[in-house]
Image (cartoon, grey):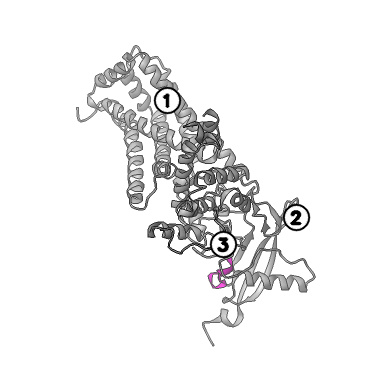
């Protein structure tokens, strides 16, 4: 190739300001690195791989960052890139963000997801186990064991199936928290509550679930929702904030009508 | 029963719901307030406006109850707003270098605490100006026109109504979302209605400083 495709042959030259933090106790700081000849075809994480190779060659500590599937479905990758969770694109996880979205000579700030409930462990790695504890509090259904039941034994309305599937797309990456000006986890919890509340399998624990999951969410120290909806814009799976409204009414309803265990008998 | 209500109010969703509910009632109060104020434009003497004020005074204990209700509404809304603001700051102890927009934020949604505090400061000025002042001699209408004919008074009231408009721009659709009524079928209508309502309330209130400054109570249509 010739002429106008300089970046193809020479690649991008970038200045990176990367958050470096030794451990959870360290206060952390930005360090500046220069990278040369990065292909615009590589993903953002592949660019960081090249940075780490360069650092290793120089005998320096590589940058720690989370990643696993690198195809946008595992929810491992994080990063706030130039102030945006998962970078500039909509419905794109950091692993699927490509360097063609950046221009030659660009300066890029790379930070971890920041929230009290997501403490940074090292460099760009934060501990998102708060989400696991919210799920453990109620994000599951009781399943009968034994022989498999007939596939059509439980009728599910098409609309409920579609909405539940939309909510179930959540990969639990935490970008909603990272992008929220209040560091709230409402989109994640809303998606998980909605997913199960919409399906017949989720009915037995429906009230208990939303009460327990919201309680755990609050315990973890996430912020309050201000209906700014940046979570929806940052979500790599495009989860709608309609799920937050559904969780709100599930919570309101459950708060008003749930009976503590044993109370049901008192009515007879 | 009480402990259940307490648990609800301590939860993030409970706090937001109560803030939304008090906000809704405050919007209704503002509509009634601005409708009553419009009687100032009914004549050049302020007679109608003073009669309206006298009617409210004549309610006696009912007026006291209404005022107490307003104190509770404003108090709860402000206290919850401050509390959630502080909690939200605490939820991100280490700030980003610059949290850039992902695409859904608006000026109004991002500045609710700021506009809220400006409205609170205005509320204090407003209560000192008209609720605590003694207007038994000249009448309330004359006092309002006197305050708002002065450039400083008019400026404070006009600018405050700008902040109120921005606050209300986000408020209505936000409370619909918080109370769980969001549905794609009527979401566009809720958003539009909320913006129109917010801007209309603030704009109607803002006419008072503007017209008082221009005409000093001598309305050209009378």
Count residues near mark 1 (Cα–Cα under 10 Å), then give few for <14, some for 14-19, many for 20+.
some
- On the same chain, marks 2 and 1? The answer is no
- Does any portion of residue A223 appear in the rendered image? no
- Bounds of the magenta segment: A94-102
Residue B61 location (% of width, % of height): 37, 14
- In the displayed structure, A36 sits above or below B117; it is below
CA separation, marks 2 and 1? 50 Å
Residue B69 location (% of width, % of height): 42, 23
Residue B63 location (% of width, % of height): 36, 18
CA separation, marks 3 and 1? 45 Å
Please report, as a chain letter, where disc 2 is located: A
The mark found on residue A23 in the picture is 2
Please report, as a chain letter, where disc 3 is located: A
By secondary structure, the bulk of the magenta-drawn segment is best described as helix
The mark found on residue B70 in the picture is 1
CA separation, marks 3 and 2? 23 Å
Camera-side residue: B111 or A252?
Answer: A252
- On the same chain, marks 3 and 2? The answer is yes
Camera-side residue: A89 or A268?
Answer: A268
Please indicate whether residue B30 sits to the left or right of residue A256 in the image: left
Camera-side residue: B135 or A109?
Answer: A109
Q: Are marks 3 and 2 in contact (CB under 8 Å)?
A: no
- On the same chain, marks 3 and 1? The answer is no
Q: Quadrant of residue A260?
A: top right
- Quadrant housing the C terminus of chain B: top left
Name the residue that disc number 3 marks.
Answer: A86
Residue A49 location (% of width, % of height): 67, 71
């Amino acid at each position: 190739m010739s002429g106008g495709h300089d970046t193809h042959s020479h690649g991008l030259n970038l200045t990176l300001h990367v958050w470096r933090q030794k451990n959870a106790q360290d206060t952390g700081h930005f360090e500046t690195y220069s990278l040369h000849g990065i292909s615009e075809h590589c993903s953002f994480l592949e660019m960081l791989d090249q940075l780490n190779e360069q650092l290793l060659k120089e005998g320096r500590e590589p940058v720690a960052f989370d990643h696993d599937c690198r195809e946008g479905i595992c929810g491992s990758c994080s990063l706030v890139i130039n102030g945006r969770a998962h970078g500039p694109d909509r419905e794109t996880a950091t692993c699927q963000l490509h360097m063609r979205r950046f221009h030659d000579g660009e300066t890029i700030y790379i930070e971890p997801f920041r929230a009290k409930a997501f403490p940074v462990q090292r460099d760009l790695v934060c501990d998102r186990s708060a989400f696991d504890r919210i799920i453990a509090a109620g994000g599951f259904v009781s399943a009968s064991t034994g022989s498999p039941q007939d596939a059509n034994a439980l009728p599910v309305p098409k609309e409920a199936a579609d909405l539940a599937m939309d909510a179930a797309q959540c990969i639990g990456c935490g970008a909603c928290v990272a992008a929220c000006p209040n560091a709230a986890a409402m989109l994640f919890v809303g998606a998980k509550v909605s997913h199960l509340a919409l399906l017949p399998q989720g009915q037995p624990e429906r009230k208990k679930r939303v009460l327990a999951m919201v309680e755990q969410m609050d315990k973890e120290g996430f912020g309050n929702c201000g209906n700014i909806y940046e979570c929806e814009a940052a979500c790599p799976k495009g989860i709608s904030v309609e799920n937050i409204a559904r969780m709100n009414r599930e919570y309101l309803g459950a708060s008003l009508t749930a009976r503590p265990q044993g109370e049901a008998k008192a009515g007879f | 029963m009480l402990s259940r209500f307490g648990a609800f109010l301590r939860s993030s969703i409970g706090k937001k719901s109560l803030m939304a509910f008090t906000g809704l009632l405050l919007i209704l109060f503002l509509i009634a307030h601005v409708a009553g104020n419009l009687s100032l434009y009914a004549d050049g003497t302020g007679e109608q406006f003073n009669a309206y004020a006298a009617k409210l005074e004549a309610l006696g204990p009912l007026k006291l109850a209404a005022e107490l209700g307003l104190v509770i509404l404003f108090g709860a809304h402000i206290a919850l707003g401050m509390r959630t603001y502080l909690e939200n700051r605490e939820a991100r102890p280490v700030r980003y270098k610059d949290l850039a927009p992902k695409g859904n934020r608006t000026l109004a949604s991002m500045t609710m605490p700021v506009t809220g505090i400006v409205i609170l400061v205005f509320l204090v000025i407003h209560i000192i100006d008209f609720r605590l002042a003694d207007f038994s001699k000249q009448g309330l209408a004359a006092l309002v026109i006197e305050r708002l004919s002065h450039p400083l008074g008019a400026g404070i009231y006009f600018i405050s109504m700008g902040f109120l408009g921005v606050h209300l721009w986000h408020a209505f659709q936000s409370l619909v979302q918080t109370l769980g009524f969001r549905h794609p079928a009527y979401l566009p209508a809720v958003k539009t209605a909320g913006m129109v309502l917010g801007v209309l309330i603030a704009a109607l209130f803002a006419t008072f400083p503007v017209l008082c400054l221009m005409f000093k109570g001598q309305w050209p249509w009378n």
